[in-house]
């Protein structure tokens, strides 16, 4: 993963990371269904309200090329990834292999939700995700696309239900027609 290849030789100070990991561990490790875990992780994020200071100033600047990801923690049952989005940066339409909960730490995102009807995607609607909002989803009802529709840099924190230090949470990406779906290795 890019963020690992570009990782600095020293470990940046991650304000609030240790407490986040400590609080998420017992939730992610329990034997419960994915949707329940995603919801409980959402409650932890809502309570702790992690700040953009999880990232360094350089990381918070983002990139003109694409949204950028920073894996902050990974263990067997969950991973923590921060994503920095400049205005207009957008994912492909995709779904996930595992549960995912994310919080908007800075700026605003728009999430578009989809369902599959036969052989094509149906747009279910858009959800505005302002700073502080939390969203948790679990397969199979998790086809979405996320975009920074604001005019400032946005930062989101994603918790995924797997060790993603050497992989991706994405099951597949979609074009507007589902038969064009293809495998992917580099999306949220
Ligand atoms: Fe996603």
Image (cartoon, rainbow, N blue to C red):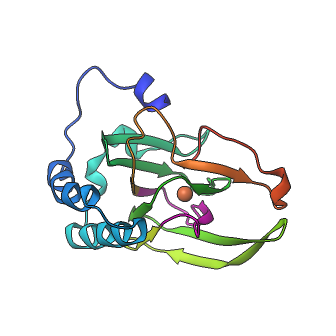
Question: Horizontal and vertical percent for residue 169?
Answer: 51, 47
In this picture, residue 181 sits left or right of residue 68: right
Is residue 41 positioned above or below 168 on the image? Answer: below
Query: Is residue 82 in the magenta section?
Result: no
Residue 35 versus residue 59: which sits nearer the camera? 35
Q: Which image quarter: residue 126?
A: bottom right
Is residue 135 positioned above or below 152 on the image? Answer: below
Which segment is the magenta one?
138-156
Q: Residue at x 15, y 48 (%)?
A: 18
Question: Horizontal and vertical percent for residue 106?
Answer: 39, 62
In this picture, residue 135 sits left or right of residue 172: left
Q: Quadrant of ligand 1?
A: bottom right
Question: Horizontal and vertical percent for residue 79?
Answer: 35, 47
Q: Residue at x 41, y 65 (%)?
A: 34
Question: Horizontal and vertical percent for residue 158?
Answer: 40, 55
Q: Which image quarter: residue 115?
A: bottom right
Is residue 173 positioned above or below 31 on the image? Answer: above
Outermost front residue: 31
Task: State the count of labels.
Answer: 0
Residue 167 versus residue 12: which sits nearer the camera? 167
Q: Which image quarter: residue 35?
A: bottom left
Residue 7 versus residue 100: which sits nearer the camera? 100
């Amino acid at each position: 993963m890019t963020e690992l290849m570009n990782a600095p030789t020293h470990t940046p100070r991650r304000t609030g990371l240790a407490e986040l990991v400590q609080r998420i561990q017992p939730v992610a490790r329990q034997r419960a269904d994915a949707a329940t875990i995603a919801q409980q992780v959402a409650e932890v994020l809502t309570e702790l309200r992690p700040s953009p200071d999880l990232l360094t100033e350089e990381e918070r600047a983002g990139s003109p090329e694409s949204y950028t990801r920073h894996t902050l923690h990974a263990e067997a049952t969950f991973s923590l990834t921060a994503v920095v989005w400049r205005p207009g940066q957008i994912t492909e339409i995709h779904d996930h292999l595992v549960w995912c909960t994310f919080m908007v730490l800075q700026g605003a995102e728009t999430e578009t939700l989809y369902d599959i009807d036969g052989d094509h995607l149906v747009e279910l609607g858009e959800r505005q995700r302002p700073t502080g909002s939390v969203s948790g989803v679990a397969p199979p009802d998790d086809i979405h696309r996320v975009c920074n529709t604001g005019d400032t840099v946005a930062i989101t924190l994603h918790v995924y239900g797997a060790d993603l230090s050497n992989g991706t949470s994405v099951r597949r990406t979609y074009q507007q027609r589902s038969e064009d779906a293809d495998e992917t290795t580099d999306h949220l």
